[in-house]
Image (cartoon, rainbow, N blue to C red):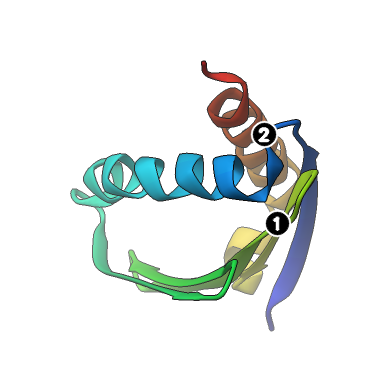
């Protein structure tokens, strides 16, 4: 059973600036996952990025919605990873906050 996490991060970059930051970070994220992920898929639909990551026999799906003053991140974790949901949410929140704060 999937357990969705919803994380929101405020920013002052505007929609265009925040989307640019997300787009720029995608190659780095793919590189970090290269050693463990068997598949990383992503697709933009307007200002919403949908993604699917298959790694270690588990599949994680989600989306990042870029809004004028915040990012809304929803991640569906398989039940095994759902047990670590709080820790995963905190790491995602921390990394996204750093991404949005870079100048």
Left or right placement of residue 33 versus residue 10 in this view: left
| Camera-side residue of 80 and 72 | 72
Residue 28 found in image quarter: top left
Can you say whether 40 is above or below 86 in the image? Answer: below
Would you call the spot at circle 2 few (<14 residues within 10 Å), some (14-19), or many (20 or more)? some
Contact between marks 1 and 2 (CB within 8 A): the answer is no
| Horizontal and vertical percent position of residue 100 | 60, 30
Q: Position of residue 8 (x, y in %)?
A: 80, 48
Relative to residue 12, is residue 51 depicted above or below? below
**In the picture provided, is 34 more to the left or to the right than 96?**
left
The residue sitting at 77% across, 40% down in the picture is 9
Q: How many marks?
A: 2
- Give residue 13's mark: 2
10 Å crowding of disc 1: few (<14), some (14-19), many (20+): few
Residue 79, how many percent across, how many down?
65, 72
Tell me the quadrant of the picture where the N terminus can be found.
bottom right
Q: Which element carries disc 2, helix, strand or loop?
A: loop
Dot 1 corresponds to which residue?
83
Residue drawn at the location 48% of the way across and 39% of the way down: 21
Q: CA distance from mark 1 to mark 2?
A: 33 Å
Disc on res. 3: none
Residue 6 in the image: x percent, y percent?
79, 59
Which quadrant of the view contains residue 24?
Answer: top left
Horizontal side of residue 38 vs 83, given as left or right = left
- Reply above or below: 38 against 68: below
**Residue found at the far top of this picture:** 103
Q: Label 1: state its secondary structure.
A: loop
Residue at 67% x, 34% y is 13
Which numbered disc, 1 or 2, marks the residue that appears first in the sequence?
Answer: 2
Side of 97 where 61 appears, left or right: left
Residue name at image x 62 percent, y 21 percent: 101
């Amino acid at each position: 059973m999937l357990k969705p996490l919803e994380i929101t991060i405020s920013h002052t970059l505007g929609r265009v600036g925040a989307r640019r930051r997300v787009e720029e970070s995608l190659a780095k994220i793919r590189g970090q996952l290269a050693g463990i992920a068997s598949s990383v898929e992503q697709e933009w639909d307007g200002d919403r990025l949908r993604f699917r990551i298959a790694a270690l026999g588990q599949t994680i799906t989600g989306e990042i919605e870029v809004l004028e003053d915040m990012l809304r991140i929803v991640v569906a974790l398989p039940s095994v990873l759902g047990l670590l949901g709080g820790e995963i949410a905190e790491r995602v929140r921390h990394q996204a906050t750093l991404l949005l704060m870079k100048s």
